[in-house]
Each structure stands twice: as structure tokens, then as C-alpha cells.
Image: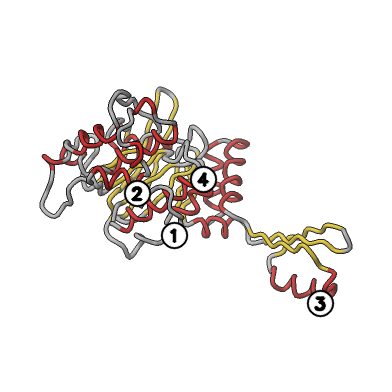
Amino acid sequence: MALVEEDTHAPAAHGGADGPGAAVEVSGLRMRYGDSEVLAGVDLHVRSGEVVVLLGPNGAGKTTTVEILEGFRARSAGDVRVLGADPATADERWRARLGVVMQSWRDHGRWRVEELLSHLAGFYAPYAEPGRPKPRAVPELLETVGLSDYARRRINTLSGGQRRRLDVAIGIVGRPEVLFLDEPTAGFDPEARRGFHDLVHGLADENTAILLTTHDLDEAEKLADRILILAGGRVAAEGSAEQLAGRVSADAEVKWTRGGQRFVHSTPDATAFLRGLFADYGDEVADLEVRRAGLEDAYISLVNRYEAGGAHEAASAFAEEIR
């Protein structure tokens, strides 16, 4: 499966309440830099086979959260377990069970693509355990991320999008049980992004737990089994894209034209309103459009309150609204 295949998947509930146990468990996570508290009590879990997306404005603590879970940053307080271990003290055998795609990393530009992947795959062999599959074969991996034609290219000659595909290949070469993706599709063109979505769904089908951060709301809606919105150092909202959108606003926006004039009406019952509209005007109604609140509306509602009223108050008010 290359990164140029058509994305035919809908977000599937791979995990959830009836799925396997949690691969990531976080309770009361706090992180302070000097006088600034970036994370003020974050609770989250990710089950095996589940795709969870973290959303939030810049500075909300998404990358900090992921780095703590990866073991790259020490937390100030809270309980964190990834695959049953504390990332702050876990060993290399534990780390071999993770996959990481960071926002950026310093690579060895003179290496050829296939050489680097072969070299990295070799690090996983000493940690192989009974029942765990071997690292991905390099030709298969290159095909998966759409880099087969660039196997012999030096890394420093790749385009930005191609280097990002290589980042993804590095993250999944060891067949991780938990995969962390921090803004993974930055630099991808639309076709490559659709192929990447196929890849994520395929990994989830293989029972990989996936925690992903993104600023792309459309991507979050397509990929996520659950979405967590961070604001004010806390999880201000949690649920599927449909759940978040449905709880923020029950009204639908109906737009139409009649006699060359444009009309807009908000209604809690679009079906009843449309029946009345056609009963009154019949074929005079044209250019009809019905729009319900989406993930973007839910997200913007939170961010606007965050920017206008202070982080803690905004998060608390939003969380209360969607209960």
C-alpha cells in the first residue's frame, strides 16, 4: 500500500469501551516551566487499535504531552503508563515497542534512504520477543510510504514532502505497538495525505495504538476514533467528531434562494422547516443547502473562549456546555 492510494476508509471504532485494554494511561499529568503551568491535570487513555487525536491552539501542550509519553521529557507530576511502564524510567526494550514521528529531526543527509532504514531496522532485532513480528522489510516499507522510487537517493536530496514520508517510515519500521505522530502530514500534498490516512487505518487494524497531534481539523475528523481538545492545560472536550459537533450546537443552518434573493435560517428541526418551506414555495426554492455544526465549529467555539476569557475559565465553561 503506497501513500498514493485512494482513501476509502471511514473512521472506525477500533478501540473504545469494548476494545482491548489501554496501551496509554495518563492521570493528573502536570508540566510546569518556571512559573508557567503548561499542563494542569491532563487525563487520557488510548486503547490498542484506537486512533486518538489531540487538538488545541499553539501552546496548549500537545507536543509536551506527547514528549512526556515518549520518555523524552520529564513531567512535573501525575501518573503515566505506556505499555504498562513509566516512560521516565522505562528501558530500551520498552522503547523498541514504540514508534515516534516527531515534527522535525536531524537526519544523516548523506545516507541513502534504504540504507538508513536498513540500519535502523537492525536496532530492533536484539529486542525481538516471542509472538512479536520482525521489523518491516525495507522494500515493503518503502512501498508503504511511497518512496520505492527514491530508495537509492541521498536524504539531503529529497523534497520536504519526501523527507516527511521518510519520517513516517522510520516511525513504523519496528512495527510499534504504540505510535506517536506529531503533525505527521506537514508537507504532504493532498494525494499523499489520503494515502497516509489509509496507512493509519491499516496500522490501527493491526492493533497499533495511535496518538496523533494535528492542526488539520479535516484530518482529525477522518482519522480519529476519539478527539481530545486541550485548552488551559486540561482536556476541555473529548469524544468523536460527531459527538463534539452535536453537543455544541443543535441548530442546523438552512440556505436557499427564491426569486434571485438569498435566505438563511437557523432551526433545531431542519426536516420540519424544509417541509414547510416547500409547502409554501415549491419549485421557487433553489440552491438549497443544509449545514449542521461540525468539528470546526466545536473547535472554534473553544478556541474563541480560550483567547477571550482565560484558559481555565474557557476550558471549564466549554466542558460544562458539552456534558
Disc 1 on helix, strand or loop? loop
Q: Amino acid at mark 2?
A: Ile
Identify the residue at horizontal 32%, vertical 24% (top origin): 109
81, 270: nearer the viewer: 270
Answer with the quarter of the image where residue 309 lies.
top right
Q: Which mark is residue 238?
A: none
Say if mark 4 contacts mark 3, CB within 8 Å.
no
Q: Amino acid at mark 1?
A: His
The location of residue 35, given as percent across then percent down, is 43, 24
144 versus 77 height, above or below: below
C-alpha separation, residue under disc 1 versus residue under disc 4: 16 Å
Disc 2 target residue: 210
Answer with the quarter of the image where residue 154 lies.
top left
Disc 3 target residue: 279
C-alpha separation, residue under disc 4 versus residue under disc 3: 42 Å
Say if mark 2 contacts mark 4, CB within 8 Å.
no
Q: Around disc 1, counting alpha carbons within 10 Å, would you say few (fewer than 14), some (14 to 19), or many (20 or more)?
A: few
Q: Amino acid at mark 4?
A: Pro
Disc 4 target residue: 190
Q: Earlier in the sequence, mark 3 or mark 2?
A: 2
Q: Earlier in the sequence, mark 1 or mark 4?
A: 1
Q: Is residue 110 left or right of residue 193?
A: left
Identify the residue at horizontal 39%, vertical 41% (top origin): 41
Q: Earlier in the sequence, mark 1 or mark 2?
A: 1
Disc 1 target residue: 9
Q: Nearer the viewer's eye, disc 1 or disc 4?
A: 4
The outermost residue toward the right is 259
189 versus 275 height, above or below: above
Q: Earlier in the sequence, mark 1 or mark 3?
A: 1
Count of labels in the image: 4
Q: Nearer the viewer's eye, disc 2 or disc 4?
A: 4
Q: Is residue 186 left or right of residue 178?
A: right
